[in-house]
Image (cartoon, grey):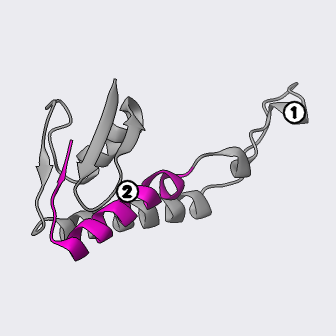
Amino acid sequence: MLYKFKSRATADLIMLEPIGRRVLQILGKDADQAQGIITVEQIPAAIAALQKAVAQEEAAAAAAPPPQADEGASTDDIKDPSERVWLRQRVVPFIEMLQDSAAAGREVTW
């Protein structure tokens, strides 16, 4: 499943199901709904919620111990944290969409 976010102020933004669902859950929206809306009045809170989730993920990653290989595993089995796709990387385009939509006085739908 894909989530297609639309605004009359920006180009469409498409997210794959796992990240789209996570974004909607962060925003307090029902991810099971096929359609929904983020009103202009809700946009500042939505941006703040996304930024808070990004900060929490980064704080948790900074506090976590570095990954260790299991006994007998090679060093190639250790995942490099730089290879991970962080929430920040996934939501920056959406935050920009929200900001542009708010500036234009337009809602975001999906």
Q: Decide whether residue 12 is among the magenta residues.
A: no
Are there few (<14), some (14-19), or many (20+) residues within 10 Å of tag 2? some
* Residue at image location 55% in from the left, 52% down from the top: 86
Q: Position of residue 36 (x, y in %)?
A: 12, 42
Q: Which quadrant would residue 50 be assigned to in this image? A: bottom left
Which of marks 2 and 1 precedes in the sequence? 1
71 and 25: which one is in front?
25
* Residue position for label 2: 94
* Residue at image location 28% in from the left, 45% down from the top: 5
Quarter of the figure that contains the N terminus? top left
| Cα gap from disc 1 to disc 2, whole angstroms | 34 Å
Amino acid on which disc 1 is placed? Asp
Q: Which quadrant would residue 56 be assigned to in this image? A: bottom left
Number of dots carrying numbers:
2
Q: Decide whether residue 100 is among the magenta residues.
A: yes
Q: Position of residue 82 (x, y in %)?
A: 72, 52
Residue 39, numbered label = none
Specify the segment rendered in magenta: 86-110
Residue 21 visible, this angle: no
In the displayed structure, 32 sits above or below 28; it is above
In the displayed structure, 99 sits above or below 13; it is below
Tell me the chief SS of the magenta region: helix
70 and 99: which one is in front?
99
Q: Position of residue 81 (x, y in %)?
A: 70, 50
Most distant residue in the bottom direction: 103
* Residue at image location 34% in from the left, 47% down from the top: 12
* Residue position for label 1: 76
Amino acid on which disc 2 is placed? Phe
Please tell me whether mark 2 sits on a helix, a strand or a loop.
Answer: helix
Are there few (<14), some (14-19), or many (20+) residues within 10 Å of tag 1? few
Please tell me whether mark 1 sits on a helix, a strand or a loop.
Answer: helix
* Residue at image location 27% in from the left, 52% down from the top: 26
